[in-house]
Image (cartoon, grey):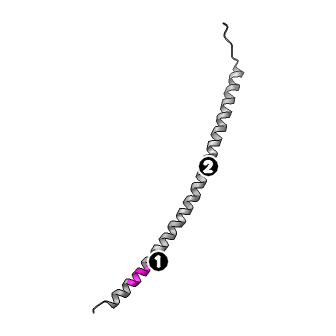
Amino acid sequence: MARKKISHSDVSERVGLRLSSHEKVCAERMKTLFNAIEELKVEVKSLRTDVAKGKGAISVLVFFGTIIAGIVGFFSWDG
C-alpha cells in the first residue's frame, strides 16, 4: 500500500485551524475571567464600605461608653 504524502500546505492549514479554535476557547476563558474579576472588584468595594460603617459605629459606641463611664465615675467617687 502506498503511503499518502501530506503536503506542507495541508499541514499548515490543519495547524491553523487547530490554533484558531484554541484561540477561540482561550478568548472565551479570558472573557469569563475578566467578568469574574470585575464582580470581585464590586464585592470588595461593597465589603470595604460595610467595614468602614462598622468601624464608625464602634467608635461611636466607644465614645458614648467613655462618656457614661466618666459620669458614673464622677458620681460614685468618694472624695
For the image, the number of numbered tags is 2
| Residue at the spot 40% in from the left edge and 81% down from the top edge | 66
Q: Position of residue 26 (x, y in %)?
A: 63, 39
Name the secondary structure under disc 1. Answer: helix
| Residue at the spot 34% in from the left edge and 91% down from the top edge | 75
Name the secondary structure under disc 2. Answer: helix
Which label is found at residue 60?
Answer: 1
Relative side of 33 to 12, left or right: left
| Residue at the spot 67% in from the left edge and 8% down from the top edge | 2
> Looking at the picture, which amino acid does disc 1 mark?
Val
- The image quarter containing residue 38 is bottom right
Which residue lies most toward the bottom here?
A: 79
Q: Bounds of the magenta span?
A: 63-68
Q: Earlier in the sequence, mark 2 or mark 1?
A: 2
> Looking at the picture, which amino acid does disc 2 mark?
Phe
Relative side of 19 to 57, left or right: right
| Residue at the spot 66% in from the left edge and 27% down from the top edge | 15
Q: Position of residue 34 (x, y in %)?
A: 61, 49
Instruction: Determine crowd level at label 2: few under 14, some 14-19, many 20+ residues with C-alpha closer than 10 A.
Output: few
Which quarter of the figure is the N terminus placed in?
top right
Q: Position of residue 52 (x, y in %)?
A: 51, 68
The residue to which callout 2 is attached is 34
* Vertical placement of residue 33 versus 21, above or below: below
* Vertical placement of residue 25 versus 14, above or below: below
Residue 53 in magenta stretch: no
